[in-house]
Amino acid sequence: MALCEVLNSFLFEYDTPRIVLIRSRKVGLVNRGCSSAFSWVFLWEKGYQETDSVVSSVTTKVKGVTLTNTSTLGARIWDVADYVIPPQGENTVFVMTNVILTLNQSQGHCPELPDDQTVCKVKSDCVPGYVSTHSSGIQTGECVPYNSSINTCQVLAWCPVEDDSHIPKPAFLREAENFTLLVKNNIWYRKFNFSKRNILPTINSTYLKNCIYDAQTDPFCPIFRLGKIVEAAGQDFQEMAVEGGVMALQINWDCNLDRAASHCVPKYSFRRLDNKDSAHTVSPGYNFRFAKYYRNRDGSESRTLIKAYGIRFDIIVFGKAGKFDVIPTMINIGSGLALFGVATVLCDIVVLYCMKKKYYYREKKYKYVEDHELGVGETYGTNS
Amino acid sequence: MALCEVLNSFLFEYDTPRIVLIRSRKVGLVNRGCSSAFSWVFLWEKGYQETDSVVSSVTTKVKGVTLTNTSTLGARIWDVADYVIPPQGENTVFVMTNVILTLNQSQGHCPELPDDQTVCKVKSDCVPGYVSTHSSGIQTGECVPYNSSINTCQVLAWCPVEDDSHIPKPAFLREAENFTLLVKNNIWYRKFNFSKRNILPTINSTYLKNCIYDAQTDPFCPIFRLGKIVEAAGQDFQEMAVEGGVMALQINWDCNLDRAASHCVPKYSFRRLDNKDSAHTVSPGYNFRFAKYYRNRDGSESRTLIKAYGIRFDIIVFGKAGKFDVIPTMINIGSGLALFGVATVLCDIVVLYCMKKKYYYREKKYKYVEDHELGVGETYGTNS
Amino acid sequence: MALCEVLNSFLFEYDTPRIVLIRSRKVGLVNRGCSSAFSWVFLWEKGYQETDSVVSSVTTKVKGVTLTNTSTLGARIWDVADYVIPPQGENTVFVMTNVILTLNQSQGHCPELPDDQTVCKVKSDCVPGYVSTHSSGIQTGECVPYNSSINTCQVLAWCPVEDDSHIPKPAFLREAENFTLLVKNNIWYRKFNFSKRNILPTINSTYLKNCIYDAQTDPFCPIFRLGKIVEAAGQDFQEMAVEGGVMALQINWDCNLDRAASHCVPKYSFRRLDNKDSAHTVSPGYNFRFAKYYRNRDGSESRTLIKAYGIRFDIIVFGKAGKFDVIPTMINIGSGLALFGVATVLCDIVVLYCMKKKYYYREKKYKYVEDHELGVGETYGTNS
């Protein structure tokens, strides 16, 4: 019986707060003003949308050839297979712009590069087996002439050791400025099963063959001139080419999927990621070493050591898509109603503490009830 | 004294809205219906859970050998070190399926590939120093025979220049279809300090040695047959092998960590990332160039240029984990109560505007208070 | 006229709930306690902040040389170009610690490695053309002596085939423990346009040249000793060096941008990502194969196959930044007010169901209204 009654009252009763409705221009306007502000927040923040982050895949391809002419190498053509390392076109692509070649290295004994620790006068200045972080090899304990004026400790190393104290300037492959980078980017918003490519369907093949990205005239061309990327980030290509650096090519895919899919387009921007200020940095710029190994006629191994300076382009893809969805809408309407509550609280403060007739309003809004036996009658009488 | 009083009233008073409780079947049911819907949203959306995104690490390994037999190379075995480039097994792995080899290139002069811009009749058709995006080298200004019928401008380049106009069809390494890809994936939910591997603890070594992933029969085997991956994405391996392409192997780690950890298992899915439709694209498929460098007996350098077509497999890992946490629970209960407010607002509209006895209910709910001196008595009298 | 009236009442009226204010110590304290708890949640969870996830770029560089002395290779120096594969310093860097070299491989016929399937007694045990996942090449159908005691099927392969059954122990390049890893990390919080590098501006170049990261003494030095990284993750370097493994170097950039930018500093931590327990895994540790190709005097190709075991260091960057923003503040105040509603609901339960004078309070809070014509007079009379 009791359960039935409870259920009955649960299902068929409805409770709603009793409201004091105050007819006041001032307070009414304050209240509506606050409420409007909150509604606007809801719409502006797209509180009615479900959002998702982008999943992306990038392929890249560099094009261009250049000629160098030096005493050691003679006239030499450099093409993609020579200067893009590794050759794979992923979301990071490195273009060599400068290089220190150490030809014909082989395992053997030779003098170490001179510095504070390796310059020696007599044999006892060198410690056999000594090796530090900056060593080219392991010291044998001998002191041998490095050039006509300086002696250095002998090392067991790939000889001759690389001398990277003089970086070629201007950069060896300074014409890399004119190379082009093709970026193909495929994105996917998983929640909405929406995918798109940065080569828009409106673009035709003829255009793609010849276009170069330009923020004003060709904002959707996926082919970038390296020099322009660096310039758009406010940097100087020729300066950057000498010691190398890291550039970000950012693709922004922020989309409102409540609008037509054709409005969802990539926005490109450029930024330098490494610190130009070489005062505060170890190994400024960007470089790495690798070697090409050869087998000699006698079966021994030799190598060409390459210290490659260059610009690394990181393709960074980000974005957020939003689409109307009933559940976040409801949750946000909930929060929104609570915000109307904020408006009510603010107005209450005005009405109950700041207005002349505050005691009158308080009397209307509140009903005072005492917990003490004694007080009951009193308060009961005061309020209706 | 005043402060004491304020504190007293702050601490020991309690205010609760005065409620009109209406006993009405219709409105009661509407109200409970709305409320139930909102409660359901709260539970269904897992509003009581804290969520976190996955942090992931992937290693991969390809296995398989194949034999090719061509007039230029003779019978030749291809193993992992030959066709996986770069050899490193990270979250992107490239398997070469087709190749254009240009053997024995060396720096020198040779005729450019014929196209609109390079075909020439006389010397003056060629501009010394000319180089475009699609050039193999730098023009010397001479016009030389390319074959018996065509003359083209001479270039300084790696000679002979690569002729990639004919792609081998069927693909050179078409048997890559049978190669296998082992994917090892370790995920981590940082907030919950929960980590797991895609090789589940329930799987034994014997099974792992021989299993091949199959959505139905072996959904947790981490070894994939390349042909099956492509097929599962609705593509044709042999067709894709010719020009290459990019495939996504997606691992979904959505987990409800309120349940046992053993319920948190990877779900694999497959998608093609590049655009098959070659009409709307530059450089369709997926390929890149690299070279193997050799030293000749006379000390000069030569190379084998390899234009490698193939399939790149991007292992894309995503997921979201949820676990009960008291703070989001409270915040969401807050939003939820506000949603009950929506129910009340809806019911109020029904009761106060749509029902026959609306004026009667309004009188009960509202107490009208005028801001004007004059109106006070009037409204005061009307409402209780 | 009607519209005007509606607008008038919409703009110039203000409704606020009528409140029962109960003066009770017990309930008052409960109410204030709950409310305080909820306010604290709001502040502690930084509900007043807008948040953003980190965008990151990493470059790395390894330094160190070591000497090995074996019967096959003699004394040999290993430097960065030899043991870092690929040479590129991105967010994943591999340092070779152990190696199985197979020198002078060339295409030809030779006996397969012996296992269950390849050991043979007579020619008919071998199937011409047979190839499995674990094969080195393609069987020719002959049965040839592998060594003095065992015969195996002959294969067409790169010969001699690699024998990786015995892994060198201790590891070949065991001194990799002392190599150093420089990590340069640039992060960006896009919403706040805040970027920072892990080489803090307070660090000078002299310090950077010699420092080594240590959680206690040098927590901001970006140069790590490989041995220390492994040790900090609770692993043994020498043991890990044998079969290889995958380590995570985690950089945590959680920042409160309401405080000074100088408080936003990286926190490093270390974790092993692969499973040490080799019982439950295929191809334990971390290794991959690659080859160096040589041209012989007669023009044929040979290669050195390298099975490189080593430690891969994945630089994983994560973090969340928060900054005061008016919109999330308002939304969270909304949720917060709703939480105060939870406090009211809790107190109502106490007051209306648990206290002695519950009927008295109910009478004050509720006004009962019946939907039936009959009940109206009754309820109307009971409540004021």
Image (cartoon, coloured by chain):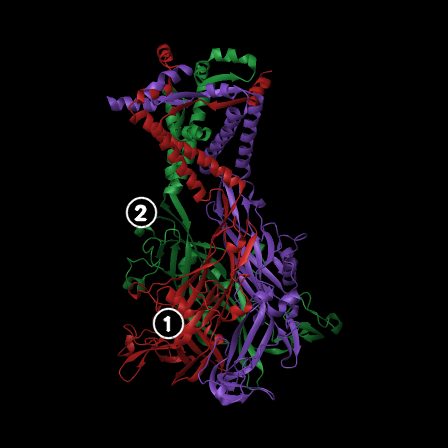
Chain colours: A purple, B green, C red
The kind of secondary structure element at disc 1 is: helix
Count of labels in the image = 2
Label 2 sits on what residue type?
Arg
Indicate the quadrant containing the N terminus of chain A: top left, top right, bottom left or bottom right.
Answer: top left
Residue at the disc numbered 1: C241
Label 1 sits on what residue type?
Ala
Instruction: Please say if A49 is above or below A299.
Output: above
In the displayed structure image, the side of residue B334 where residue C1 appears, left or right: right
* Residue drawn at (65%, 64%) of the image: A237
Q: Nearer the viewer, mark 1 or mark 2?
A: 1
Residue A197 location (% of width, % of height) = 55, 52
Q: Chain of mark 1?
A: C
Residue A95 location (% of width, % of height) = 58, 67
Q: Nearer the viewer, residue C239 or A343?
A: A343
Q: Residue furthest right?
A: B124
Residue C80 location (% of width, % of height) = 48, 75
Instruction: Please say if C236 is above or below A206.
Output: below
What crowding class fits label 1: few (fewer than 14 Cα within 10 Å), some (14-19), or many (20 or more)? many
Q: Nearer the viewer, residue A172 or A156?
A: A156
Residue at the disc numbered 2: B259
Residue B37 visible within the image: no
Q: In which quadrant of the rendered view does residue B139 lie?
A: bottom right
Residue C202 visible within the image: yes
Q: Are marks 1 and 2 in contact (CB under 8 Å)?
A: no
Q: Residue furthest left?
A: A1
In the displayed structure image, the side of residue A110 where residue C44 appears, left or right: left
In the displayed structure image, the side of residue A70 where residue C377 appears, left or right: left
